[in-house]
Image: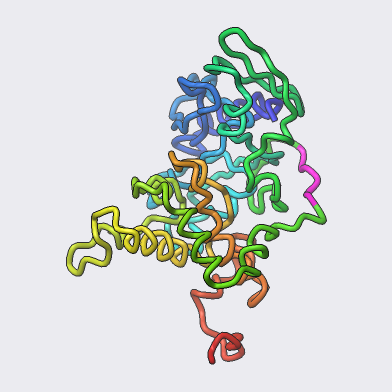
Amino acid sequence: MIGYIEKIKQISERLLKEGTVESVVGFRKGSMPMMNEPCIVKRPDKVEALVWDSNCGINLTNYLTNRKDKIAVIAKGCDSRNIVTHIIENKIKRDQLYIIGVPCKGMIDKRKVSGLAEGEITSVSEDGDAILVKGNGFEKTVRKSDILQDNCAICVHRNPVIYDELAGDLVEEQKDVNRYEDIEKIEAMAPAEKWAYFEELLSPCTRCYACRNACPLCYCPTCFVDESKPQWVGKSQNDMDIRTFHFLRAYHCAGRCTDCGACERACPQGINVRQFTKKLEKDCLELFGWEAGMTLDERPPLDTFKADDPEAFIK
């Protein structure tokens, strides 16, 4: 994917010089390996700072919410679907955006890479499917397909769904992928087994809210966990408060989540918080035939009412 860099720079420079946009939201090299950071470029002579590789996992849609200016944004498949949701929910207007689409072959999981290293990692570079990991006294080459983020490994919408210009050729979408294999295993558990599973899953949570802050869908003016009148959730490390936070946050994303993986990537404890949102994503697909962010012409199923909505859950 590093082959996209020059095209991204060319497009960004042209848009800024012509005054088509006032700024470009993209990535620049981070201060640590595998940690490229979002940046906003406002001058043509600054586009050289832009980068694109398999370490651009942060969802840039976060930086579009309630913007008033004309802005270009570099968007991979999941980002573009979140942009669709932003437009539908009136968080930004389509005519404000110039979307530079990036066909994506997945982002690497920094935790998986760190687990393979024999010490501190000093650099990570890529050449096609080969990822070269270097550190103090060691050097290792691994296949990118072996260290993808879990959400990228099962992604079937790698190409942007909306864009104004592409930074590269569209890639072949993955087929015959069971996106919900892990969810089906949990669904098959007995109630007591499920309870034990989720108890263990959430036990490391410190309620730092990194998952919420990284999520491009969490843009309520005041989050329910921060409300004081009434106070919905306590401030302690009470197990019930932790469960309440995760369950309610997931339901707020129901029918809207694109499984971009931003929440899981941001979690300092490495909790697979996608287990909650993926279950609701599966339900929306099975009950309503709905996948979030695929069209501007239809609102999410939980945002509308239809007389023929399925009611099998009512007993």
Image quarter in which the N terminus is found: top right
Expressed as whole percent of the image width and height from the top left, the position of residue 231 reads 21, 66
Query: Which region of the structure is painted magenta?
Result: 169-174
Nearest the viewer among 199 and 130 is 199
Q: Compared to 166, does 27 lie above or below?
A: above
Q: Compared to 38, does 313 lie above or below?
A: below
| Residue 295 seen from this side | no
Nearest the viewer among 48 and 35 is 35
Residue 69 among those drawn in magenta: no
Q: Name which residue lies at 56% across and 75% down.
A: 301
Q: Name which residue lies at 68% across and 29% down.
A: 4
| Residue 164 seen from this side | yes
Left or right: 167 in relation to 198: right
Q: Quadrant of residue 76?
A: top right
Q: Compared to 9, does 182 lie above or below?
A: below
Q: Name which residue lies at 44% across and 32% down.
A: 40
Expressed as whole percent of the image width and height from the top left, the position of residue 234 reads 24, 60
Expressed as whole percent of the image width and height from the top left, the position of residue 13 reads 56, 27
By secondary structure, the bulk of the magenta-drawn segment is best described as loop
Expressed as whole percent of the image width and height from the top left, the position of residue 266 reads 46, 41
Q: Name which residue lies at 53% across and 63% down.
A: 256
Image quarter in which the C terminus is found: bottom right
